Amino acid sequence: MIDKNYVRFFDTTLRDGEQSPGATLTSAEKLEIARSLARLGVDVIEAGFPAASKDDLEGVRQIAIEVGNPSKGEEDQPVPIICGLARANESDIDAAWDAVQHAAHPRIHTFLATSPIHMEHKLRMDPEEVVERVKEMVTYAKAYCDDVEFSPEDAGRSDPEFLYLVLGEAIKAGATTLNIPDTVGYTTPEEFGGLIAGIMEHTPGVEDVIVSVHCHDDLGLATANTLAGIQAGARQAEVTMNGIGERAGNTSLEEIVMALRTRQPVFELETGIDTTLITRVSRQVSNYTGIPVQPNKAIVGANAFAHEAGIHQDGMLKHNETYEIMRPEMVGLNQSRLVLGKHSGRHAFKVRLAELGHELDQDELNLAFVRFKELADKKKEITDADLEALVADEIYQPTEIYKLDGLQVACGTMGLATATVRLVGPEEDTHEFAAIGSGPVDATYKAIDGIVETENNLLEYSVNAVTEGVDAMGQVSVRLEAETGEIAGRTSPQSGARTARTFGGHGADTDIIVASARAYLSALNKLLEASGKYGEFSPTAEVSAPAPEKVA
Ligand code: KIV
Ligand code: ZN
C-alpha cells in the first residue's frame, strides 16, 4: 500500500551530485556522507553509477554493506534503500546488482531517453526500439531485484503520449518506481506539474507504483518544479544536498524538506527527515566535495538566517516571526555548543565524536586526539563545528602519498613571500623545497609543486572560518585539474563518454596557510592516486561494463 501522505526522499548526492565538475570524493568520504544521509532520514540513497569504474562499483558495494544494513544491536532500526544507477543495458545492470545486492533493501535504477532529440541524435533508436529496450531491460533488472526504478531520460521534453506508453510497459515489466526527470531543467512549474498530472491520469497501472520527480536547475526552477510535481501526485523527490549536480545542479534536499515542513497546511504531507541535521550534512558535503555554498543559498547559506537591515533587526527583537519563517534551530543552526576543552580526556572526545556520528577505529582516534590536543592548546573553546572540521581534515582524506611534515612562511609588505615546505613522500623519504610567490599561499603551493612535480591547474581556492573569532579554524577548499592526458576520467552515465577529471581537496587548521597546504596536498594525493602510479587500484583501469553501441 502506498502512503499518499508521505513523500520519500531519494538522495542522489553521491551519484548526480558527484557528477558536478570537481566533486570527486574518496571512498571514505562517500561512506561518511552515506552514513550522514541515513541519519538524516532519507529513504533511498543513490550511492553511485557502478558501471563507471571498478572504484565506483566498490564504493557502492561498501555503502550497501555498511549503510544498507542495520548495525549490531540495532536490528529493529530502519535502514535506507541503497540504489545503483544503470543504463538500459545488461552489463550496466549486472554491475549495479553486483554492488547493491549486499544491502537489506537494494534497488536498481535503470534509464533510457524518450525525447525525440535524444532518441534521434544520442541513441539513434526508433521510438519502437526504445519501448522494446525498456521492456527487456526492466525485465532483466527485475530478475535480480524486486525493487526496480525506471526513468525516461529527458521526460521534460518528451511527448506525453509516448511517455504514457513507455511507462505503462515499464510497469508491466515490473518497475515499482517511475521517475520523471527534467534532465535539462527546461520546464516551467505549470508544465512539469501538468506532465505529472497527465502521467497519473493516463499511465496504465500507475496507481500501484510510486511516481518520482527529478529536476535540474538550469533555469533556477528545480525546487518549484519538484513541488509542482509533488502537488500533482508524485510521492518521491530526487534531490541532492546543497543542490549540487550536473551543470546548474539538482533540486536541493533542504529546500524541498523545509518547504513541505514550513508550509505544511498547503501541502499536508509528511517526510522522514530529521531537519535538525540539515546544517551539519550540508557542511560535510561542502567540505568533502570542495564546492562552497553560496552565502545567500536558501536554508543552508551563511546569510540564510542573518538579519542585516536595521528595520528587520528591530522587528526581530520585537517578535522573531516578523521576518523569520523558520527558526534556525529547526535546521540545526545555533546548536553548536562548547563541548570540550584543553583538559578533556580521550574518552570524552571519543564519546562526543560518536554522538556526532563518527565511529573511529583506534588508530584514527589516536590521530584525531593528537590534533584535538594541538587545537586545544591554541583555541580555548572547541565546538562541534571545530570537531567536524578536525575530523574531516585528519580522517576523511585520500591515501596520503605525500604528507605535510613542516612549513615555514615569511610574508608581509617587505619583499616577496617565501615558503619552505617539508613533505614525507611515498617511500617515507623526506623532501624540502623553498619557493617565492606573489603571496604566502602561492609560495607554499610552488614549494609543494617543486617536490610533487605533477602538472595541474588550480581552478578554485576558497577559505572559510569554521567558527567566529580571531582564533577560529580556517577551512580551505581547492579544486584542481590535471593537465596530463594520463588521468582518464570515469564514464558519464548520460553521454557514455570519458569525462575530464578535476580533483577537490580540503584542509583545516587555525593557521590558514597550513590549512591551504593541507587542502592542496589532499587534492594532489587524489590526482596521484588516480594516475595509477601509486596504490593498488587505478580508476584509469578498464571500466567493468562498457556500453553497447546504441546507448552512447
Ligand atoms: O537527469 C537525469 O535525467 C538523470 C537520470 C539518470 C535519472 O539523472
Ligand atoms: Zn539528473
Image: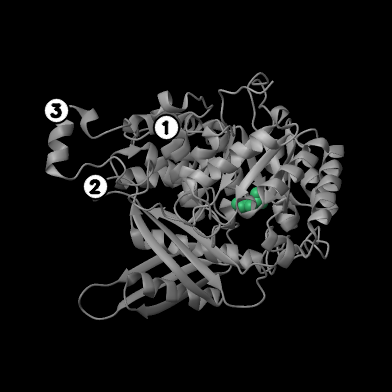
In which image quadrant can residue 328 be found?
top left
- What whole-number distance in Å separates the C-alpha atoms at marks 2 and 1? 25 Å
Q: Earlier in the sequence, mark 1 or mark 3?
A: 3
Q: Residue furthest top?
A: 76
The tag on residue 345 is 1
Please name the residue that numbered disc 3 is placed on: 318
Q: What residue sits 33% from the left and 71% below the top?
A: 440
| Nearer to me, 551 or 274 | 551
Residue 131 placement, left or right of 49: right
* Scheme of colours in the image: one colour
- Mark 3: which amino acid? Lys
Instruction: Please state the horizontal and vertical placement of residue 476, each as a whole percent of the image.
Output: 40, 58
Please name the residue that numbered disc 2 is placed on: 469
Quadrant of the snapshot with the N terminus:
top right
| Nearer to me, 532 or 365 | 532
Contact, mark 2 vs mark 3 (Cβ under 8 Å): no
Q: For mark 2, give the secondary structure.
A: loop
Q: Earlier in the sequence, mark 2 or mark 1?
A: 1
Q: For mark 1, give the secondary structure.
A: loop
The tag on residue 123 is none
The mark lying in front, picked from 2 and 3, is: 3
Q: Earlier in the sequence, mark 2 or mark 3?
A: 3
Quadrant of the snapshot with the C terminus:
bottom right
Figure label count = 3
Q: What residue sits 50% from the left and 39% below the top?
A: 228
Instruction: Mark yes or no: residue 349 visible.
Output: no
Q: What residue sits 34% from the left and 42% below the top?
A: 376
In which image quadrant can residue 340 be found?
top left
